[in-house]
């Protein structure tokens, strides 16, 4: 199912919910979707993203902000059109999650809260900046969905409603906790809302090994660069995020000259490594800065072999560390490989994740799978993918569907 998001109009009489390329108008007093809906976003919301809206937040100024991926747009309800954007979040929302937000809500106090994965930030609309966070949802929003929020709305009743998957929860702002008796299913409680009306049939998973699928999964998160470059920490890297931060590591690999295609000698490889490692400013310039001075590259086959060799090292380590590794859902195995690929002392120094994984409690594992993004905002897409993988694993177990199949990128 497509993600759900929405907002309450400033007058408080109507709410609008968006999912996929459609939207519905919800009558607050009648507590149901108005007749004639759903309708397509295209043609009804001029200038707006026509599908894939992640979050909608009505601002104290009266404007409504829509977020999709790493972009946002400002919508004027009176003029009934986009009046600014789309623009990148980065540089325009100081301190906000630059790669995208999952949900946002302006509290009765006037502060805004934005959620992304398992984290949230507090945003001051008057100061136009984040004033607290990122912080984990767990421990700060008692009883709320810890593994992620799809939508958040401040209802005219003075209560907030949070949606996640096919469930929703009412949040009592005065008591600062989820109200008793929640969460509950969306189906039957929000008449006509285009989600949660029925449990979807099990999706068709991919009958492919985690090893064979891993390059397809991780390449969009790391890129694929055939020449040496410096990562954000100044470490020499190549291929799909493979660290080679000593000349000896570089010399173990096969390299050819970019201009001739002839094999490079060990001395040439070591000299290339020093040129890349010692060049000023390369870490800030990314791999394209290194491309300007690179003279050697790896062949496509050599990069494939390097990626799978590192995967095999991680596979042996993970299988030895986790007693029940062979029985993990394939999405969970893929998620663990994803964390291991990025380093971060995994799995030895991840006690909360390990306790959950050893108990096959994948919902708790999802809440404890976040890699640090400090100094490396490029980790955010990987964190988002990992959250989906472990959330998928929880759904696989709960629904009793085939553990051997990979369901990602489908969200179960």
Image: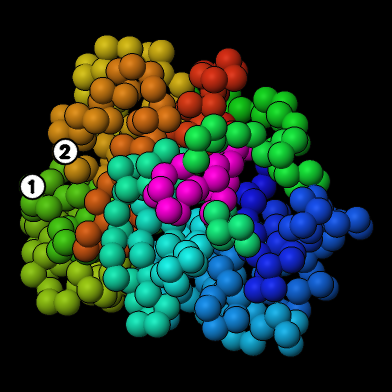
Residue at (54% x, 32% y) in the render: 181
User: Quick check: 391 above or below 217?
Assistant: above
Dividing the picture into quadrants, the one containing residue 386 is: top left
Q: Position of residue 113 (x, y in %)?
A: 43, 62
User: Quick check: 356 above or below 260?
Assistant: above
Residue at (77% x, 57% y) in the render: 29
Reply yes or no: does residue 206 show up in magenta.
no
Residue at which label 2 appears = 345
Colour scheme of this structure image? rainbow
Confirm whether residue 40 shows in the render.
Answer: yes
Kindly report the secondary structure that dominates the magenta region of the rendered protein: strand
Check the picture and name the quadrant holding the C terminus: top right
Check the picture and name the quadrant holding the N terminus: top right
Q: Nearer the viewer, residue 296 or 333?
A: 333
Reply yes or no: does residue 161 show up in magenta.
yes
Circle 1 crowding by C-alpha within 10 Å: few under 14, some 14–19, many from 20? few
Dividing the picture into quadrants, the one containing residue 398 is: top right
Earlier residue among tags 2 and 1: 1
Residue at (67% x, 29% y) in the render: 203
Circle 2 crowding by C-alpha within 10 Å: few under 14, some 14–19, many from 20? few
């Amino acid at each position: 199912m497509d993600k759900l998001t929405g907002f309450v109009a400033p007058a408080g009489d109507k709410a609008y919910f968006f999912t996929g390329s459609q939207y519905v108008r919800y009558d607050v007093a009648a507590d149901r979707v108005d007749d004639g809906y759903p309708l397509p976003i295209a043609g009804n919301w001029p200038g707006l993203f026509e599908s894939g809206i992640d979050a909608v937040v009505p601002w104290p100024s009266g404007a409504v902000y829509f977020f999709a991926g790493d972009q946002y747009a400002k919508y004027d309800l009176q003029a009934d059109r986009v009046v600014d954007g789309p623009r990148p979040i980065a540089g325009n929302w100081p301190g906000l999650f630059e790669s995208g937000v999952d949900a946002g809500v302006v509290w009765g106090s006037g502060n805004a809260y934005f959620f992304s994965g398992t984290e949230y930030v507090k945003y001051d609309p008057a100061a136009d900046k984040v004033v607290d966070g990122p912080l984990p949802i767990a421990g700060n929003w008692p009883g709320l969905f810890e593994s992620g929020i799809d939508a958040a709305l401040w209802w005219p009743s003075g209560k907030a409603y949070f949606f996640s998957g096919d469930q929703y929860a009412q949040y009592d702002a005065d008591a600062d906790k989820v109200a008793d008796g929640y969460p509950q299913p969306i189906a039957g409680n929000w008449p006509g809302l285009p989600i949660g009306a029925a449990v979807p049939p099990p999706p068709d998973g991919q009958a492919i090994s985690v090893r064979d699928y891993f390059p397809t999964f991780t390449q969009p998160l790391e890129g694929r660069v055939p020449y040496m470059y410096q990562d954000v920490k100044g470490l020499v890297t190549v291929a799909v995020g493979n660290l080679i931060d000593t000349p000896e590591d570089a010399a173990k690999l096969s390299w050819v000259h970019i201009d001739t295609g002839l094999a490079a000698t060990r001395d040439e490889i070591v000299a290339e490594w020093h040129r890349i490692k010692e060049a000023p400013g390369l870490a800030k310039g990314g791999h394209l800065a290194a491309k300007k001075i690179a003279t050697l590259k790896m062949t496509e086959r050599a990069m494939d072999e390097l990626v799978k060799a590192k995967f095999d090292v991680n596979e042996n380590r993970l299988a030895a560390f986790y007693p029940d590794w062979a029985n993990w859902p394939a999405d969970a195995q893929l998620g663990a490989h994803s964390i291991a690929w990025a380093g971060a002392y995994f799995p030895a120094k991840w006690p909360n994740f390990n306790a959950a994984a050893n108990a096959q409690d994948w919902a708790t594992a999802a809440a404890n799978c976040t890699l640090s993004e400090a100094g490396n905002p490029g980790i955010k897409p990987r964190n988002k993918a990992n959250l989906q993988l472990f959330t998928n694993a929880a759904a696989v177990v709960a629904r009793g569907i085939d553990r051997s199949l990979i369901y990602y990128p489908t969200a179960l």
